[in-house]
Amino acid sequence: MAKELALPARGVVSKVSVAKKLPKRTEAFVVPVFKDPEGGAEAIYEPSGLFDKETEKFIANALATLKVSGEHGEITKIPMPKKAGVDIVVSLGLGDRNKLSGEQVRRAAGLVARGLVGVEKVATTLGDFGLGPAVEGVILGGYTYRGLQTSEIEAAKAPVAEIVFIGANKQECEAASIRAESVVLARDFVNTPSSHLYPETYAELAADVAKQFGVKVEILDDAALRKDGFGGIIAVGQGSARKPRLVRLSYAPRKAAKQVALVGKGVTFDTGGISIKPSANMDHMISDMGGSAAVIATVIAAARLQLPVAVTATVPMAENMPGSEAYRPGDVITHYGGKTTEILNTDAEGRLILADAIARACEDNPDYLIEVSTLTGAQLVALGTRTTGVMGSDDFRDRIAAAGRSVGEEAWAMPIPEELASAMKSPVADLRNLTPDRFGGMLSAGYFLSEFVSEGVEWAHMDIAGPAFNTESTYGYTPTRATGVPVRTLLSVLAEIGAEA
């Protein structure tokens, strides 16, 4: 990033660089090893060429003595003699070389980044087997977020200060670093407590970082939203003393042949409003703006990577509180563009602010529209905590789901059944904000949003309720709390669209 972002705290990650040979004062050297495809017990180790023959023989013998197998994710530390030039050699198992994928490299890199805490400088040839995934893995896997803890982090628990990729392409490394840094930005936004991140401050922070990279910024405050008829955003945000905002971030390179609209849910905290949530785990609702964090980080990354596609992120921001001015079940609201919605439950609030934002985004006549939101608990019931549900135009929906899987952000295409049209009808408005039964909640939310997409726009809705915030244990390169999903999926899709021109 060009300058430090004014968040109360940021995650700590490793610096990544490239070099032609082993740098001086390298503490650890990571060597990839593979499982024997013929079933042998010993790992397959290929000398790096960075050490003399005696040292290479020492490493090979140590691997055999320690019975290193090369299984994926296996990490073994070997203390080295002084003349080797490094304190330890770390073998990193990548499994069967013939079945090696970018995601396996990414996950292994994340594991080794966490396994080498307290080390200042690490060098590796892991990039030989997929530089982009390796760089993303070490940055994302070593990510450490301590929030507002006042104690200093212990040196022995600090992530690796610098990871050097030997013989790597500098330009490719820089691009992978930007992708990973963008995920980190999204993580930092989501991890920030709602005491510090609310519509006004969030809008200012997003604008601040966007302007550093030449991204155009427009912010509508509460008065402007009322004047322009953004009834969904106003309704959800009116119960809070912290009034809503709508932020628009635009990256428009010259000669861009395609235009993509991104929309992200920015509920900075969700109590459920009058239809209040149970108190258990309500603290997790700081993550209800995960979709907005992802699209903000994506449009900034597009500018940094200079992708040949125009991208505009339209981000509604609101805090859903049960204040004296809060909207109520039974209310009818008028959205931007004129459609009306009957409120059956104030905890189905995300779709209301997204409806306004989608309608506004469609006024730009984009070729594609992608909306991202932590929208429904039904997503977790249907697909679990790690798989995004994708709905929308059939071909574009499938394309996005495939892109997610290709970069390690699991996604699955879901339908919008035609019978939902009658289930979402209201006797007093154009729509109601949920169906009266508990079935197909993820799908009905997708149907609701589809009603605000202009005809002819290829679109997709990504429900990331589970994948955006990891409440389980750390795995691969994914930490607990904010994950940054689906920034890498979005960047992959934007790169594909840019290549179409």
Image: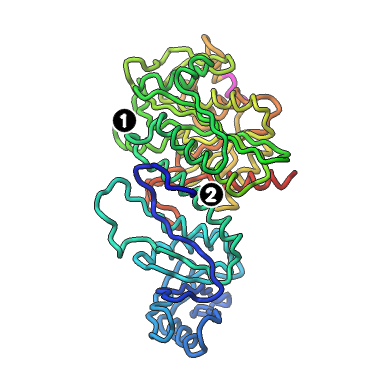
Residue at 58% from the left image edge and 27% from the top image edge:
358
Q: Does residue 379 appear in this view?
A: no
Query: In the rendered image, which residue does mark 1 sit on?
Result: 278
Q: Earlier in the sequence, mark 1 or mark 2?
A: 1
Q: Is residue 464 left or right of residue 492?
A: left
CA gap, disc 1 to disc 2?
30 Å
Crowding near the residue tagged with mark 1, few <14, some 14–19, many ≥20 C-alpha atoms within 10 Å: few
Relative to 192, does residue 332 appear above or below in the rendering?
A: above
Q: What element does badge 2 sit on?
A: loop
**Which is closer to the viewer, label 1 or label 2?**
2
Query: Horizontal and vertical percent for residue 114?
Result: 39, 62
The amino acid on which the numbered mark 1 sits, given as a three-letter code, is Pro
Q: How is the image coloured?
A: rainbow
Is 420 included in the stretch rendered in magenta? Answer: yes
- What label does residue 409 carry, if any? 2
For this orientation, the residue located farthest to the top is 428
Q: Main secondary structure of the magenta part?
A: helix
Percent coordinates x, y for residue 108 in the rendering: 48, 64
Does residue 82 appear in the picture of this structure? yes
Residue at the limit of the structure toward the right, as seen here: 501
Q: Is residue 307 left or right of residue 223?
A: right
Foreground of the two, 34 or 3? 3
Across and down, in percent, residue 163 comes to: 46, 66
Q: Residue at x 60, y 30 (%)?
A: 416
In the picture, measured across the screen, residue 25 lies left or right of residue 297, that is: left
Q: Secondary structure at mark 1?
A: loop
The residue at 32%/34% (across/down) is 195
Give the vertical position of 278 relative to 209 (above or below): above
Q: Which residues are magenta?
A: 418-422
